[in-house]
Image (spheres, rainbow, N blue to C red):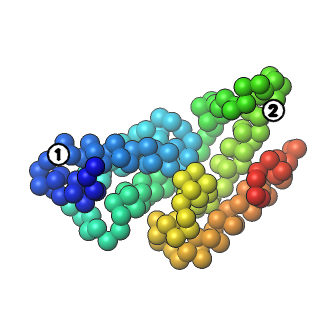
Amino acid sequence: MHSDAEIIQRILGGDIEAYRELIQRYQRMIFVFIYKMVNNHSDAEDLTQEVFVKAYEKLSSYRGDSQFSTWLHTMARNRTIDFLRRQKYTESDEQLAYVPSQNREESPQESLMGKEQRREIEEAFAMLSDTYREVIVLRCTHEYPFEQIAALLGVAESTARVRYLRARQELAKILSRKEGGLIHELPGI
């Protein structure tokens, strides 16, 4: 397996096909991040493609000061924030899609309750600011350490930790205001 730096050198040397390796290596990570931010599969696919096209166009500007994945993630973050600023967030059936339970012995009533809880959490998550959604996605979905989150966001590690804490508190506050308050459903809040 070639390192990112080796692949980038091949691409800059004219081996356009080598870019496929970078796409295959990072496409899922970028898609998952964008999807968690926009909560729409089609938009996430489009934005992911746009990010990789732009990254290819700007590849010569990659200096290697940070990991390629960090550089690419920053590009995805900026593109997603631009998209969200231009979009009015609207719910769609896809956003409320049922995610099957891991528990195969779940009753229909338990399944419906689980679906309703996920829907309420998704609605509350959508109410968070982009900044708070982003830090929760980076920490909870990608399980990045605070040091890497800070680097991606361009802030101090302590600032990343505070944002994460405030994001969780805000999410908890939103959920507690909802009818039935799902606050007890979120571990660690």
> Which residue shows up at 47% across the image and 41% down it?
44
Secondary element type, mark 1: helix
Q: Position of residue 98 (x, y in %)?
A: 66, 29
> Which residue occupies the extreme left position in the image?
14
Label 1 Cα neighbours within 10 Å, binned few <14 / some 14-19 / many ≥20: few
> Which residue occupies the extreme top position in the image?
108
> Which residue shows up at 30% across the image and 53% down it?
55
Q: CA distance from mark 1 to mark 2?
A: 50 Å
Q: Callout 2, which amino acid? A: Met
> Which residue occupies the extreme right position in the image?
180
In this rendered view, identify the residue nearer to me: 133 or 70: 70
Q: Callout 1, which amino acid? A: Ile
In this rendered view, identify the residue nearer to me: 37 or 71: 71
The answer to whether residue 91 is left or right of residue 73 is: right
> Which residue shows up at 61% across the image and 36% down it?
95
Q: Which residue is mark 1?
A: 16
